[in-house]
Amino acid sequence: MSKAKAEIKKALDKEKAAKALQANSPLKTRQDLKGFWRQYPKARDLFGQIMVTWRGSTARRPGVTGCWAAYPYPWWSEKTKLPESTLRYYLKKLVEHGLVERQQGHHGGKRTLAFIRPTALALELSDGRPGDRYHLGLIEGGEAEKPVKPAGKPIAETALTPEKEDHPPQSMAELMAILKG
């Protein structure tokens, strides 16, 4: 029991340190972020892969809200096509600039994994999706805040396709007859 409490305390300390990094980040605006991406294009590509992977991940850390992407460094290296040393260098840059949080730990086994996720600052400065803040743990609980996945293509995309454009639109009477039929 004391080991679990120590792990939670350690995780909370790391979360406080990550928030301090975000507060002290030199990146304050989207323009700052664009300049950073121009200076470090591999970091931009790595960040994009982190976002894609993190959005589909459900790994958790004790004492920390939200989800993490939890995979070993060789997996990240293979996914990003970066050598492991280069991957760690750019991860360090992302952490230093307050865009990514990184922790090491175990998830469902003995193998050490890199737990990685974007920060609130990264979501604020980049083009995030509506469910990202919930997935990061910034929005608590109810069903209303959870992201809703659409059940198919939006109606606007499926209403008229190029091959159906030569047909005139149906009148209200024709639509009502179809609905009643």
Image (cartoon, rainbow, N blue to C red):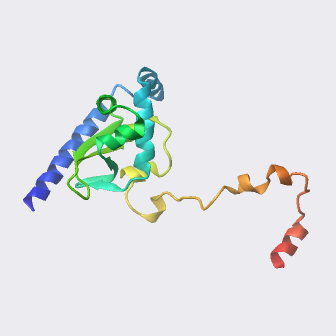
31, above or below 80, in the image = above
- The quadrant holding residue 60 is bottom left
Residue 76 percent across, percent down from the top left: 35, 41
Residue 34 percent across, percent down from the top left: 47, 25
180, above or below 164, in the image = below
Question: What residue is drawn where x is 89% and y is 62%?
Answer: 170
Question: What residue is drawn where x is 18% and y is 44%?
Answer: 13
Left or right of 91: which side holds 33?
A: right
Look at the image and tell me whether residue 138 can be seen: no
- The quadrant holding residue 117 is top left
Left or right of 175: which side holds 58?
A: left
179, above or below 135, in the image = below
- The quadrant holding residue 149 is bottom right
Residue 112 percent across, percent down from the top left: 22, 48
Question: What residue is drawn where x is 30% and y is 53%?
Answer: 65
Residue 178 percent across, percent down from the top left: 84, 73
Question: What residue is drawn where x is 50% and y is 46%?
Answer: 129
Count of numbered circles on the image: 0
Quadrant including the C terminus: bottom right
Quadrant including the N terminus: bottom left
Most foreground residue, 51 or 98:
51
